[in-house]
C-alpha cells in the first residue's frame, strides 16, 4: 500500500513539474500582445477611477450624501492617480492597433501629462480632507476641484467623445 502511494505521489510530482516546465517554456508575448495588454491595464485603472468617482458625482447631483463614502472613494482616486503616468510610460502603444482614447500628446508631453495626474492626486486628497469633515455643503462645493482635475486632463490628453 505504501509503495502504491509513493508511486502515485511520484507520478503526480512528475506531472506537476512537467506542467510547470511547459508553462515556463512558452514564448514571450509579441510586441502587439504586450501593447494590447498595456492598453487593457490602462483601461482597467481608468475604470477603477470611474467606479470611485461615480458615487461622488451622484452625490453632487442629488443622490443621498455619504461623507464616509465620499472620503473613501476620493482616497482611492488619490491612490490610483500616481499610477497613470507610469502606465503610459511603460509602453508607447501608438504604433499598434489597440483600442484607446489616449492622444499621442501623452507620449509627446509626458511631463505635462504627469502634472495632470499630480493635479488629480492633489484634488482627490483635498476633496477627501473636506469630506472627512462631514459637512455636505462644503464637500459638494469641493467636488468642482476634483471633477475639474479629471476634465482638465481629458481636455488635453484624451479623444473628445462628448
Image (cartoon, helix red, strand yellow):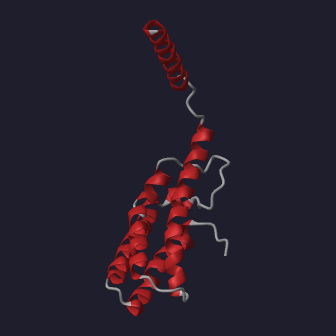
Pinpoint residue 110: horizontal percent, then vertical percent. 45, 59
Pinpoint residue 86: horizontal percent, then vertical percent. 43, 54
- Work out whether 43 lies above or below 122: above
Q: Residue at x 48, y 19 (%)?
A: 17
The image quarter containing residue 35 is: top right
In the drawing, does residue 161 fall left or right of residue 34? right
- Work out whether 156 lies above or below 32: below
Given residues 61 and 41, the one toward you in this image is 61
Pinpoint residue 23: horizontal percent, then vertical percent. 54, 26
Q: Is residue 151 visible from the viewing direction of this image?
A: no
Q: Is residue 16 visible from the viewing direction of this image?
A: yes
In the drawing, does residue 4 fall left or right of residue 82? right
Q: Residue at x 38, y 63 (%)?
A: 79
* Quarter containing the C terminus: bottom right
Q: Residue at x 54, y 86 (%)?
A: 63
Q: Residue furthest top?
A: 3
Given residues 116 and 2, the one toward you in this image is 2
- Work out whether 102 lies above or below 59: above
Q: Residue at x 58, y 51 (%)?
A: 40
- Work out whether 145 lies above or below 77: below
Q: Residue furthest bottom?
A: 137
In the drawing, does residue 104 fall left or right of residue 117? right
Q: Residue furthest front?
A: 1
Given residues 97 and 134, the one toward you in this image is 134
Pinpoint residue 70: horizontal percent, then vertical percent. 42, 78
Amino acid at each position: 500500500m505504501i509503495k502504491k502511494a509513493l508511486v502515485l505521489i511520484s507520478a503526480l510530482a512528475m506531472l506537476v513539474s512537467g506542467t510547470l516546465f511547459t508553462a515556463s517554456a512558452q514564448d514571450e508575448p509579441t510586441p502587439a500582445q504586450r501593447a494590447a495588454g498595456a492598453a487593457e491595464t490602462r483601461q482597467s485603472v481608468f475604470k477603477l477611477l470611474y467606479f470611485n468617482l461615480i458615487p461622488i458625482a451622484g452625490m453632487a447631483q442629488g443622490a443621498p450624501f455619504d461623507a464616509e463614502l465620499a472620503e473613501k472613494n476620493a482616497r482611492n482616486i488619490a491612490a490610483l492617480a500616481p499610477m497613470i503616468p507610469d502606465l503610459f510610460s511603460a509602453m508607447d502603444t501608438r504604433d499598434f492597433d489597440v483600442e484607446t482614447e489616449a492622444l499621442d500628446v501623452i507620449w509627446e508631453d509626458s511631463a505635462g501629462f504627469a502634472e495632470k495626474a499630480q493635479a488629480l492626486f492633489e484634488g482627490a486628497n483635498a476633496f477627501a480632507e473636506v469630506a472627512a469633515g462631514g459637512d455636505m455643503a462644503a464637500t459638494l462645493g469641493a467636488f468642482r476641484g476634483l471633477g475639474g482635475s479629471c476634465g482638465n486632463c481629458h481636455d488635453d490628453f484624451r479623444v473628445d467623445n462628448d
